[in-house]
Amino acid sequence: MQYFKLEKIGLLLFLLLLSPLQAHSTPLKIDKANSTIQIDVKATAGSFVGNLERFKLAIEVNEAAQAIQSATLEFDFEYLETNEPKRNRHMKDWMNYDEYPKAKFKLTTLDATGEQTLAKGSLTIHGIKKDISFPVEISQDGDRWTIDGKAHLDYLVFGLKKIRMALMLTVNPEFDVLIHIEGVAVKEEAIKKKKDKAVKSEPKEAL
């Protein structure tokens, strides 16, 4: 009985020591100058690659495990540039931009199978949320992280109509989202200094 109690206590201590390591995460400061999100669209004529010029991306990483803890991407289709103003306008009309201006992706899990890592999460476009998965490559060099991925999607599943122009021109419903993200892990000391600086800069109320 005494041995059982000691074994149980030892297990509890092990879990208590392990849990902070598992829960610890560090925010990634995105290097937007070197990060790109592109949309590769194929058509019978006029295939193009659109560039997302602005986006909001929040990533937290576990440096010890070299893994992503959480990730959320949000963007407004206003900033999806196809390098053709007329096409930009048609795209917004086609997707009911006034009612559904934004898209959002939220990572749920990262599954490593052999040499491949799959990012799984939910993607909301045109007011419809779907579960998606796509391969990613994650590399770490000191505090600097690089994330590359390619998501193969079909816009029909988001309630969007197939694009047909003239008699022969059609836009393939399947398209690729090409992701290249670079960022630097922000250390706890840097976060604390930033908070302390913000507190010191706050105006003091008159007594």
Image (cartoon, rainbow, N blue to C red):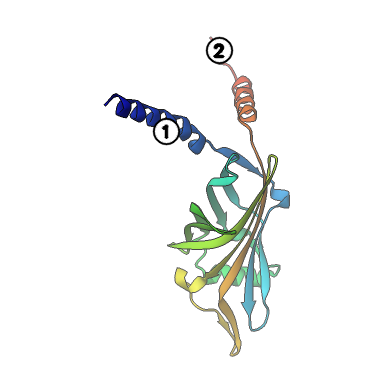
Q: Is residue 44 left or right of residue 13?
A: right
- Circle 1: residue type: Leu
> Looking at the image, which is closer to me, 176 or 14?
14
For residue 109, the mark is none
Q: Quick one: 53 or 27, which is closer to the camera? A: 27
* Residue 99 percent location from the top left of the image: 47, 62
**Which type of secondary structure does the marked residue at label 1 adopt?**
helix
Q: Label 1 crowding class (10 Å Cα cut-off): few <14, some 14-19, many 20+?
A: few
Residue 6, given in percent of the width and then of the height, sits at 35, 25
Q: Report which quarter residue 87 is drawn in.
A: bottom right
Q: Toward which corner of the image does residue 141 lie, by quadrant? A: top right
Q: Is residue 141 left or right of residue 26?
A: right
Report x, y in % for residue 94.
Answer: 53, 72
Q: Which residue is mark 2?
A: 206
- Residue under label 1: 15
Graded by Cα atoms within 10 Å as few (under 14), some (14 to 19) or many (20 or more), the crowding at tag 2 reads few
Q: Earlier in the sequence, mark 1 or mark 2?
A: 1
Spot the residue most to the left.
1
Residue 98 in view, yes or no: no
Q: Percent position (x, y) of residue 203?
A: 60, 20
The three-letter code of the residue at mark 2 reads: Ala
Residue 167 versus residue 112 in the image, above or below? below
Position of residue 46 in the picture relative to residue 165 (left or right): right
Tell me: residue 64, above or below residue 178. above
Task: Give the mark count.
Answer: 2
The kind of secondary structure element at disc 2 is loop
Vertical relation: 116 (above or below) 69: below
Residue 52, quarter of picture: bottom right
